[in-house]
Image (cartoon, rainbow, N blue to C red):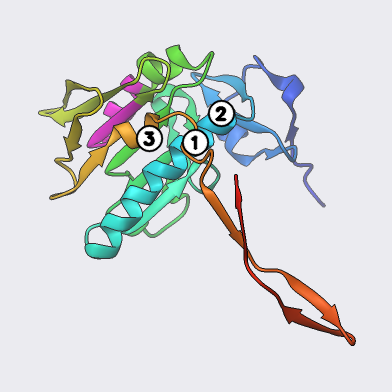
């Protein structure tokens, strides 16, 4: 006998649900859902600048990982990891999560695999979740550092775990942040906040021309993104 699987949609915004049920449910394609203190929250597709911020943050982390492959195990994006926190009835999908250890063995590692660093980019309407709710949840979950990047304010709030409490530090451009969790890593928030970071950058592409039923590579073209 088959068991019906619950499918969640954008129309479920605000619906109350247990974490155990939410974790087993399927999500409608194109829908981004979190469970926040037992309430379903639908996240809108972010604006391009949000994507650029994630991309630049990930680029800096990947460069560090290439130089120090033993210090970062995985850099995971929103659709690649989840943090299950039963005490809060919350399931979070951070913009970026940096893991230094492999996932624990056994069933459902997401409730036990603790990232070293969690990074959230503030979007319109996410301020309370990022600054208040997740601050409490990530501390209890065991995260070592929680970074909140706010493009509108052009500031980065770093929360670092010291004796089971957060110690705050505000970083503003052009200042860089010397990461405690990743020795030798200097995070450049100015590069993350820079507006139109990709605008006007030369775009290179290859052109293939069909000649006698064969595609031949032509001259590369230069343009502006």
Please state the horizontal and vertical placement of residue 137, each as a whole percent of the image: 35, 25
Q: Which residue is mark 2?
A: 34
Q: Nearer the viewer, residue 204 or 56?
A: 204
In the rendered view, tell whether residue 122 sits above or below residue 56: above
147 drawn magenta: yes
214 drawn magenta: no
Left or right position of 154 against 174: right
Q: CA distance from mark 3 to mark 2?
A: 25 Å
Q: Which mark is residue 192?
A: 3
Q: Which residue is mark 1?
A: 93
Q: CA distance from mark 2 to mark 1?
A: 7 Å
In the rendered view, tell whether residue 171 sits above or below residue 32: above
Q: Are marks 2 and 1 in contact (CB under 8 Å)?
A: yes
Q: Which residues are magenta?
A: 135-148
Left or right position of 185 against 23: left
Q: Mark 3 falls on what kind of element? A: helix
Q: CA distance from mark 3 to mark 1?
A: 20 Å
Q: Nearer the viewer, residue 11 or 207?
A: 207
Crowd tier of the residue under label 2, counting other residues whose Cα lies within 10 Å: few below 14, some 14–19, many 20 or above? many
């Amino acid at each position: 006998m088959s068991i019906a699987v619950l499918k969640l949609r954008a129309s479920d915004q605000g619906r109350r649900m247990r974490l155990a049920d939410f974790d087993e449910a399927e999500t409608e394609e194109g829908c981004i859902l979190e469970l926040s203190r037992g309430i379903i929250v639908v996240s809108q597709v972010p604006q391009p600048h949000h994507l650029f911020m994630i991309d630049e943050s990930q680029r800096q982390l990947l460069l560090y990982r290439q130089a120090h492959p033993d210090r970062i195990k995985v850099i995971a994006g929103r659709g690649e990891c989840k943090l299950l926190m039963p005490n809060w009835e919350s399931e979070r999908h951070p913009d970026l999560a940096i893991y230094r250890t492999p996932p624990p063995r056994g069933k459902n590692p997401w409730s036990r695999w603790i990232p070293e660093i969690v990074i959230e980019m503030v979007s319109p309407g996410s301020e309370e979740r990022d600054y208040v709710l997740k601050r409490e949840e990530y501390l209890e979950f065991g995260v070592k550092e929680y970074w909140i990047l706010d493009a509108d304010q052009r500031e980065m709030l770093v929360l670092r775990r010291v004796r089971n409490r957060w110690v705050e530090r505000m970083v503003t451009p052009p200042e860089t942040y010397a990461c405690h969790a990743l020795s030798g890593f200097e995070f450049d928030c100015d590069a993350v906040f820079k507006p139109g970071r990709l605008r006007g950058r030369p775009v290179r592409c290859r052109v293939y021309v069909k000649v006698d039923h064969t595609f031949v590579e032509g001259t590369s073209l230069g343009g502006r993104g």
